Amino acid sequence: MTAPVAIDSIEPAITKLVHDAPARDAETVRDLGDALRSVGSPLALSIARILEYVDDDLVDPGIALPAIAEACAALVDGVKHGVDPRALEAARYRIDTLEPRPDGPAISALASVPDVPASDLIRGPRRRT
């Protein structure tokens, strides 16, 4: 059984993160992650993983935080009121589809490579036909 303190702290924490976005309070992120890990269900652990990605700037918070908030609400309802397991699995699927965005430096490094026509890559003098 999930500790009531952990489950009761999830909705206030995610609400604070959503309201304060794009700023993120490190203590609130840590507390929410701890509460989710203490719940320990597959949905809670998926939310905690994506929350870490958001905190590490690997996932856009503008996309992830609303999905995390919805998943947190489903999780809390599931624990407190016995929501249909299919609804919880659907929430977990939505969370699991959030993927980290590529690192900025790798993309910008590729963007700085000059375009070179293939004809400039030929060795030796150009042959005329």
Image: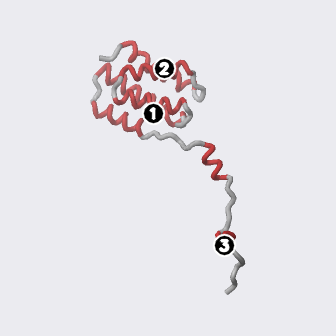
- Nearest the eye: 76 or 115: 115
Which residue has dot 1 on it? 67
Q: Is residue 125 left or right of residue 27?
A: right
Neighbourhood count class around disc 2 (C-alpha, 10 Å): few under 14, some 14–19, many 20 upward: many
Q: Is residue 126 above or below residue 83?
A: below
Label 2, label 1: how many angstroms apart (C-alpha)? 14 Å
Q: Quadrant of the N terminus?
A: top left
Which residue has dot 2 on it? 13
Farthest-out residue, bottom: 129
What's the image's color scheme?
Answer: secondary structure
The three-letter amino acid code for the residue at tag 2 is Ala
Q: Quadrant of residue 129?
A: bottom right
Q: Position of residue 120 (x, y in %)?
A: 69, 70
Label 3, label 1: how many angstroms apart (C-alpha)? 52 Å
Neighbourhood count class around disc 3 (C-alpha, 10 Å): few under 14, some 14–19, many 20 upward: few
The three-letter amino acid code for the residue at tag 1 is Ala
Neighbourhood count class around disc 1 (C-alpha, 10 Å): few under 14, some 14–19, many 20 upward: some
Q: Position of residue 98 (x, y in %)?
A: 46, 39
Q: Position of residue 85 (x, y in %)?
A: 28, 31
- Nearest the eye: 61 or 15: 61
Residue at position x 43%, y 16% in the image: 9
Q: Which mark is residue 122?
A: 3
Q: Is residue 104 left or right of residue 66?
A: right
Going from N to C along the chain, the mark reached first, 2 or 3, is: 2
